[in-house]
Amino acid sequence: MKSIRTALLGATLIAGAGANAASADELNLICSADNALCEKLAATFEEKTGIDVSMIRLSSGEAYAKIRAEARNPQTDVWWGGTGDPHLQAANDELSASYESPMLKELLPWAVSQAETSGYRTVGVYSGALGWGYNTEILAKKGVEAPKCWADLLNPALKGEISIADPNSSGTAYTALATLVQLMGEDEAFEYLLAMGKNVSQYTKSGSAPVKAAARGEAGLGIVFMHDAVKQAVAGFPIEVVAPCEGTGYEIGSMSLVDGSPNPDAAKVFYDWVLTPEAQNLALEVGSFRIPSNKASTQPEEAPKLENVRLIDYDFAEYGDSERRRNLLARWDMEVGAAAN
Protein backbone atom coordinates (compact mmCIF):
# COMPACT_ATOMS: atom_id res chain seq x y z
CA MET A 1 0.00 0.00 0.00
CA LYS A 2 1.31 3.41 -0.87
CA SER A 3 1.49 6.58 1.18
CA ILE A 4 -1.80 8.08 -0.03
CA ARG A 5 -3.73 5.13 1.33
CA THR A 6 -1.86 5.21 4.64
CA ALA A 7 -2.58 8.91 5.15
CA LEU A 8 -6.12 9.16 3.86
CA LEU A 9 -7.46 5.79 4.86
CA GLY A 10 -5.98 6.03 8.34
CA ALA A 11 -7.82 9.28 8.96
CA THR A 12 -11.16 7.99 7.72
CA LEU A 13 -10.91 4.70 9.61
CA ILE A 14 -10.24 6.54 12.86
CA ALA A 15 -13.12 8.90 12.18
CA GLY A 16 -15.39 5.98 11.36
CA ALA A 17 -14.47 3.73 14.28
CA GLY A 18 -17.57 2.28 15.88
CA ALA A 19 -19.67 2.98 12.78
CA ASN A 20 -20.33 0.48 10.00
CA ALA A 21 -17.76 -2.31 9.99
CA ALA A 22 -17.47 -2.08 6.22
CA SER A 23 -14.51 -3.11 4.12
CA ALA A 24 -12.00 -0.37 3.36
CA ASP A 25 -10.59 -2.41 0.46
CA GLU A 26 -13.56 -2.11 -1.91
CA LEU A 27 -15.31 0.77 -3.61
CA ASN A 28 -18.50 0.79 -5.70
CA LEU A 29 -18.38 3.77 -8.04
CA ILE A 30 -20.88 5.27 -10.46
CA CYS A 31 -19.15 7.50 -12.99
CA SER A 32 -21.14 9.92 -15.14
CA ALA A 33 -18.35 11.21 -17.38
CA ASP A 34 -16.73 9.85 -20.55
CA ASN A 35 -15.85 6.19 -20.14
CA ALA A 36 -12.14 6.79 -20.86
CA LEU A 37 -11.90 9.24 -17.95
CA CYS A 38 -13.94 6.98 -15.67
CA GLU A 39 -11.64 4.04 -16.36
CA LYS A 40 -8.52 6.18 -15.89
CA LEU A 41 -9.67 7.43 -12.49
CA ALA A 42 -10.67 3.97 -11.30
CA ALA A 43 -7.45 2.27 -12.47
CA THR A 44 -5.17 4.96 -11.03
CA PHE A 45 -6.98 4.95 -7.70
CA GLU A 46 -6.70 1.17 -7.49
CA GLU A 47 -2.98 1.33 -8.26
CA LYS A 48 -2.30 4.01 -5.66
CA THR A 49 -4.38 2.64 -2.81
CA GLY A 50 -4.87 -1.09 -3.33
CA ILE A 51 -8.62 -0.52 -3.02
CA ASP A 52 -10.57 -2.59 -5.55
CA VAL A 53 -12.96 -0.43 -7.59
CA SER A 54 -16.15 -1.75 -9.15
CA MET A 55 -17.13 1.00 -11.59
CA ILE A 56 -20.16 1.42 -13.83
CA ARG A 57 -20.71 4.27 -16.28
CA LEU A 58 -24.20 5.81 -16.21
CA SER A 59 -25.55 9.13 -17.45
CA SER A 60 -26.59 11.60 -14.75
CA GLY A 61 -30.29 10.80 -14.90
CA GLU A 62 -29.65 7.06 -14.85
CA ALA A 63 -27.28 7.43 -11.89
CA TYR A 64 -29.82 9.39 -9.88
CA ALA A 65 -32.53 6.83 -10.68
CA LYS A 66 -30.29 3.94 -9.60
CA ILE A 67 -29.32 5.58 -6.31
CA ARG A 68 -32.95 6.45 -5.59
CA ALA A 69 -34.11 2.91 -6.39
CA GLU A 70 -31.51 1.50 -3.99
CA ALA A 71 -32.26 3.97 -1.18
CA ARG A 72 -33.31 1.28 1.30
CA ASN A 73 -30.30 -0.89 0.52
CA PRO A 74 -27.57 1.24 -1.07
CA GLN A 75 -25.15 -0.58 -3.37
CA THR A 76 -23.12 2.46 -4.45
CA ASP A 77 -20.47 4.29 -2.44
CA VAL A 78 -19.57 7.28 -4.62
CA TRP A 79 -21.23 8.99 -7.57
CA TRP A 80 -18.60 10.96 -9.49
CA GLY A 81 -19.28 13.38 -12.32
CA GLY A 82 -22.32 14.39 -14.27
CA THR A 83 -24.18 17.67 -14.02
CA GLY A 84 -24.81 19.21 -10.65
CA ASP A 85 -28.62 19.44 -10.86
CA PRO A 86 -29.34 15.72 -10.25
CA HIS A 87 -26.64 15.67 -7.55
CA LEU A 88 -28.48 18.52 -5.86
CA GLN A 89 -31.74 16.62 -6.27
CA ALA A 90 -30.12 13.62 -4.57
CA ALA A 91 -28.97 15.94 -1.78
CA ASN A 92 -32.47 17.41 -1.50
CA ASP A 93 -33.87 13.88 -1.24
CA GLU A 94 -31.22 13.01 1.41
CA LEU A 95 -29.86 10.20 -0.76
CA SER A 96 -26.33 11.53 -0.36
CA ALA A 97 -24.27 11.93 2.80
CA SER A 98 -22.94 15.19 4.20
CA TYR A 99 -19.13 15.36 4.18
CA GLU A 100 -16.82 18.37 4.51
CA SER A 101 -13.63 17.22 2.85
CA PRO A 102 -10.31 18.67 4.05
CA MET A 103 -9.71 19.41 0.35
CA LEU A 104 -12.45 22.09 0.25
CA LYS A 105 -10.00 24.87 1.03
CA GLU A 106 -8.08 24.06 -2.17
CA LEU A 107 -11.09 24.34 -4.49
CA LEU A 108 -12.32 27.19 -6.66
CA PRO A 109 -15.27 29.24 -5.33
CA TRP A 110 -17.89 27.68 -7.66
CA ALA A 111 -16.97 24.20 -6.41
CA VAL A 112 -17.21 25.26 -2.77
CA SER A 113 -20.51 27.04 -3.48
CA GLN A 114 -21.94 23.77 -4.79
CA ALA A 115 -20.98 22.09 -1.52
CA GLU A 116 -22.49 24.87 0.58
CA THR A 117 -25.73 24.91 -1.47
CA SER A 118 -26.19 21.18 -0.85
CA GLY A 119 -25.37 21.19 2.86
CA TYR A 120 -22.06 19.52 1.90
CA ARG A 121 -23.85 16.56 0.33
CA THR A 122 -22.13 17.20 -3.01
CA VAL A 123 -19.14 19.15 -4.29
CA GLY A 124 -17.98 20.59 -7.61
CA VAL A 125 -15.28 18.61 -9.42
CA TYR A 126 -15.26 20.32 -12.84
CA SER A 127 -17.15 22.90 -14.88
CA GLY A 128 -18.04 23.63 -18.49
CA ALA A 129 -20.38 25.78 -20.57
CA LEU A 130 -23.28 24.57 -22.70
CA GLY A 131 -23.20 25.11 -26.45
CA TRP A 132 -22.93 22.96 -29.55
CA GLY A 133 -20.58 21.57 -32.12
CA TYR A 134 -21.53 21.52 -35.79
CA ASN A 135 -20.04 19.58 -38.67
CA THR A 136 -18.62 22.21 -41.02
CA GLU A 137 -18.63 19.87 -44.01
CA ILE A 138 -22.28 18.84 -43.66
CA LEU A 139 -23.56 22.40 -43.22
CA ALA A 140 -21.40 23.68 -46.09
CA LYS A 141 -22.68 20.91 -48.37
CA LYS A 142 -26.28 21.85 -47.50
CA GLY A 143 -25.56 25.56 -47.86
CA VAL A 144 -26.65 26.25 -44.28
CA GLU A 145 -25.21 29.29 -42.53
CA ALA A 146 -23.33 28.40 -39.36
CA PRO A 147 -25.71 28.77 -36.36
CA LYS A 148 -24.38 31.19 -33.77
CA CYS A 149 -27.48 31.71 -31.61
CA TRP A 150 -30.28 29.61 -30.10
CA ALA A 151 -32.67 31.31 -32.55
CA ASP A 152 -30.63 29.96 -35.48
CA LEU A 153 -31.46 26.38 -34.51
CA LEU A 154 -35.04 26.97 -35.70
CA ASN A 155 -33.83 27.38 -39.29
CA PRO A 156 -35.91 24.94 -41.42
CA ALA A 157 -32.73 24.15 -43.40
CA LEU A 158 -31.52 22.27 -40.31
CA LYS A 159 -34.42 19.80 -40.46
CA GLY A 160 -33.14 16.38 -39.37
CA GLU A 161 -29.68 17.71 -38.58
CA ILE A 162 -29.88 18.46 -34.82
CA SER A 163 -29.08 15.87 -32.19
CA ILE A 164 -29.69 16.46 -28.47
CA ALA A 165 -30.10 14.11 -25.53
CA ASP A 166 -33.24 13.28 -23.58
CA PRO A 167 -33.24 15.32 -20.31
CA ASN A 168 -34.66 12.37 -18.37
CA SER A 169 -31.44 10.41 -18.82
CA SER A 170 -28.95 13.17 -19.60
CA GLY A 171 -27.77 15.90 -17.27
CA THR A 172 -26.48 17.80 -20.31
CA ALA A 173 -29.94 17.94 -21.84
CA TYR A 174 -31.53 18.87 -18.52
CA THR A 175 -29.05 21.76 -18.28
CA ALA A 176 -30.16 22.82 -21.77
CA LEU A 177 -33.82 22.66 -20.70
CA ALA A 178 -33.19 24.65 -17.51
CA THR A 179 -31.03 27.13 -19.41
CA LEU A 180 -33.75 27.88 -21.95
CA VAL A 181 -36.36 28.27 -19.21
CA GLN A 182 -34.12 30.81 -17.48
CA LEU A 183 -33.33 32.63 -20.73
CA MET A 184 -36.85 32.79 -22.14
CA GLY A 185 -39.39 31.95 -19.45
CA GLU A 186 -40.97 28.51 -19.08
CA ASP A 187 -43.84 28.73 -21.58
CA GLU A 188 -41.64 30.42 -24.18
CA ALA A 189 -38.90 27.82 -23.67
CA PHE A 190 -41.31 24.96 -24.33
CA GLU A 191 -42.62 26.71 -27.44
CA TYR A 192 -39.01 26.99 -28.59
CA LEU A 193 -38.25 23.34 -27.84
CA LEU A 194 -41.32 22.21 -29.78
CA ALA A 195 -40.25 24.33 -32.75
CA MET A 196 -36.65 23.12 -32.56
CA GLY A 197 -37.95 19.56 -32.27
CA LYS A 198 -38.94 19.73 -35.94
CA ASN A 199 -35.20 19.84 -36.73
CA VAL A 200 -34.17 17.14 -34.23
CA SER A 201 -33.23 13.78 -35.72
CA GLN A 202 -32.89 11.96 -32.39
CA TYR A 203 -32.96 12.37 -28.62
CA THR A 204 -30.02 10.33 -27.36
CA LYS A 205 -29.54 8.76 -23.94
CA SER A 206 -26.03 10.13 -23.36
CA GLY A 207 -25.29 13.85 -23.21
CA SER A 208 -22.05 13.65 -25.21
CA ALA A 209 -23.49 11.37 -27.93
CA PRO A 210 -24.94 14.20 -30.08
CA VAL A 211 -21.58 15.75 -30.95
CA LYS A 212 -20.05 12.32 -31.50
CA ALA A 213 -22.80 11.74 -34.07
CA ALA A 214 -21.97 15.09 -35.67
CA ALA A 215 -18.29 14.15 -35.77
CA ARG A 216 -19.13 10.89 -37.56
CA GLY A 217 -21.34 12.71 -40.05
CA GLU A 218 -24.57 11.20 -38.70
CA ALA A 219 -25.92 14.64 -37.71
CA GLY A 220 -25.12 18.19 -38.65
CA LEU A 221 -25.05 19.56 -35.10
CA GLY A 222 -24.95 18.27 -31.53
CA ILE A 223 -26.07 20.30 -28.51
CA VAL A 224 -23.58 19.44 -25.77
CA PHE A 225 -21.20 20.94 -23.25
CA MET A 226 -18.60 22.79 -25.23
CA HIS A 227 -15.69 20.72 -23.90
CA ASP A 228 -17.25 17.62 -25.46
CA ALA A 229 -17.30 19.40 -28.83
CA VAL A 230 -13.70 20.55 -28.31
CA LYS A 231 -12.67 16.93 -27.78
CA GLN A 232 -14.02 15.97 -31.20
CA ALA A 233 -12.36 18.97 -32.86
CA VAL A 234 -8.99 18.21 -31.24
CA ALA A 235 -9.33 14.61 -32.43
CA GLY A 236 -9.38 15.93 -35.99
CA PHE A 237 -13.08 15.86 -36.84
CA PRO A 238 -14.59 18.82 -38.78
CA ILE A 239 -16.34 20.22 -35.71
CA GLU A 240 -16.72 23.93 -34.97
CA VAL A 241 -17.57 24.86 -31.36
CA VAL A 242 -20.20 27.50 -30.59
CA ALA A 243 -21.29 29.40 -27.47
CA PRO A 244 -24.81 30.74 -28.25
CA CYS A 245 -25.00 34.52 -28.64
CA GLU A 246 -28.06 35.07 -26.39
CA GLY A 247 -26.30 33.47 -23.44
CA THR A 248 -26.00 29.96 -22.10
CA GLY A 249 -25.95 27.87 -18.97
CA TYR A 250 -23.12 25.87 -17.54
CA GLU A 251 -22.57 22.83 -15.41
CA ILE A 252 -20.82 22.22 -12.16
CA GLY A 253 -19.92 18.58 -12.57
CA SER A 254 -20.27 17.16 -9.09
CA MET A 255 -19.49 14.28 -6.76
CA SER A 256 -21.57 12.78 -3.96
CA LEU A 257 -21.16 10.16 -1.26
CA VAL A 258 -24.17 7.85 -1.07
CA ASP A 259 -25.87 7.87 2.32
CA GLY A 260 -25.67 4.46 4.01
CA SER A 261 -23.17 3.14 1.47
CA PRO A 262 -21.51 -0.25 2.04
CA ASN A 263 -17.93 1.12 2.06
CA PRO A 264 -18.02 4.62 3.57
CA ASP A 265 -14.35 4.71 4.57
CA ALA A 266 -13.02 3.81 1.13
CA ALA A 267 -15.54 6.27 -0.33
CA LYS A 268 -14.01 9.16 1.62
CA VAL A 269 -10.52 8.12 0.52
CA PHE A 270 -11.62 8.33 -3.12
CA TYR A 271 -13.54 11.58 -2.51
CA ASP A 272 -10.50 13.33 -1.03
CA TRP A 273 -8.06 11.93 -3.61
CA VAL A 274 -10.13 12.87 -6.66
CA LEU A 275 -10.16 16.51 -5.53
CA THR A 276 -6.34 16.67 -5.71
CA PRO A 277 -4.50 18.21 -8.69
CA GLU A 278 -2.83 14.85 -9.30
CA ALA A 279 -6.17 13.14 -9.86
CA GLN A 280 -7.81 16.03 -11.73
CA ASN A 281 -4.89 16.32 -14.16
CA LEU A 282 -5.57 12.76 -15.34
CA ALA A 283 -8.39 14.20 -17.46
CA LEU A 284 -5.86 15.70 -19.85
CA GLU A 285 -4.29 12.29 -20.44
CA VAL A 286 -7.55 11.03 -21.97
CA GLY A 287 -8.37 14.19 -23.90
CA SER A 288 -10.97 15.61 -21.53
CA PHE A 289 -11.12 19.41 -21.59
CA ARG A 290 -13.28 20.18 -18.58
CA ILE A 291 -12.29 22.97 -16.20
CA PRO A 292 -11.06 21.28 -12.98
CA SER A 293 -12.12 22.49 -9.53
CA ASN A 294 -8.80 22.45 -7.66
CA LYS A 295 -7.03 25.82 -7.86
CA ALA A 296 -3.69 24.11 -8.49
CA SER A 297 -4.92 21.76 -11.24
CA THR A 298 -3.78 22.33 -14.82
CA GLN A 299 -6.30 24.32 -16.84
CA PRO A 300 -6.55 22.80 -20.34
CA GLU A 301 -5.44 25.30 -23.01
CA GLU A 302 -8.09 23.98 -25.40
CA ALA A 303 -10.95 24.38 -22.90
CA PRO A 304 -13.43 27.17 -23.68
CA LYS A 305 -12.70 30.04 -21.31
CA LEU A 306 -15.81 30.78 -19.26
CA GLU A 307 -14.91 34.47 -19.16
CA ASN A 308 -15.29 34.54 -22.96
CA VAL A 309 -18.76 32.96 -22.89
CA ARG A 310 -21.96 34.88 -22.18
CA LEU A 311 -23.11 32.88 -19.17
CA ILE A 312 -26.50 33.25 -17.54
CA ASP A 313 -26.75 33.44 -13.76
CA TYR A 314 -27.71 29.77 -13.61
CA ASP A 315 -29.80 29.03 -10.51
CA PHE A 316 -28.45 25.68 -9.35
CA ALA A 317 -30.54 25.68 -6.17
CA GLU A 318 -33.85 26.12 -8.03
CA TYR A 319 -33.17 23.77 -10.93
CA GLY A 320 -31.58 21.15 -8.68
CA ASP A 321 -34.68 21.17 -6.47
CA SER A 322 -36.48 17.83 -6.63
CA GLU A 323 -39.98 19.16 -7.29
CA ARG A 324 -38.86 21.74 -9.86
CA ARG A 325 -36.82 19.16 -11.75
CA ARG A 326 -39.61 16.56 -11.70
CA ASN A 327 -42.16 19.10 -12.97
CA LEU A 328 -39.94 20.26 -15.83
CA LEU A 329 -39.18 16.71 -16.92
CA ALA A 330 -42.87 15.76 -16.74
CA ARG A 331 -43.78 18.73 -18.92
CA TRP A 332 -40.98 17.84 -21.39
CA ASP A 333 -42.38 14.30 -21.63
CA MET A 334 -45.94 15.51 -22.21
CA GLU A 335 -45.09 18.17 -24.77
CA VAL A 336 -41.68 17.68 -26.42
CA GLY A 337 -41.20 13.95 -25.94
CA ALA A 338 -44.76 13.15 -27.01
CA ALA A 339 -44.37 15.24 -30.16
CA ALA A 340 -41.24 13.29 -31.10
CA ASN A 341 -43.01 9.91 -30.96
Image (cartoon, rainbow, N blue to C red):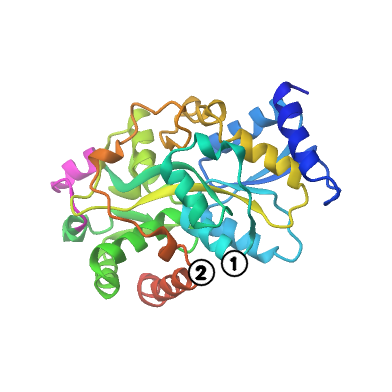
Residue 210 in percent (x, y) is at 38, 49
Which amino acid type corresponds to the residue marked 2 in the rendered image?
Answer: Ser
Residue 60 image point, x, y percent:
52, 54
Query: Can residue 158 be seen?
Result: yes
Task: Choose between 142 and 4: the one closer to the eye.
Answer: 4
Is residue 250 rendered to the left or right of residue 324? Answer: left
Q: Residue furthest top?
A: 2
For label 1, the residue is 93
Image: magenta residue range: 135-150
Residue, x 25% and y 45% (percent of image)? 243
Farthest residue, direction bottom: 334
Looking at the rendered structure, the number of numbered marks drawn on it comes to: 2
168 inside magenta stretch: no
Q: Which residue is mark 2?
A: 322
Looking at the picture, does residue 163 appear above or below residue 336? above
Is mark 2 in CB contact (under 8 Å) with mark 1? Answer: yes
Q: Sequence-wise, which precedes: disc 2 or disc 1?
A: 1
Q: Quadrant of the C terminus?
A: bottom left
Estimate the x, y position of residue 117 in percent, counting from the top left: 48, 56
The N terminus appears in which quarter of the rendering? top right
SS for tag 1? Answer: loop
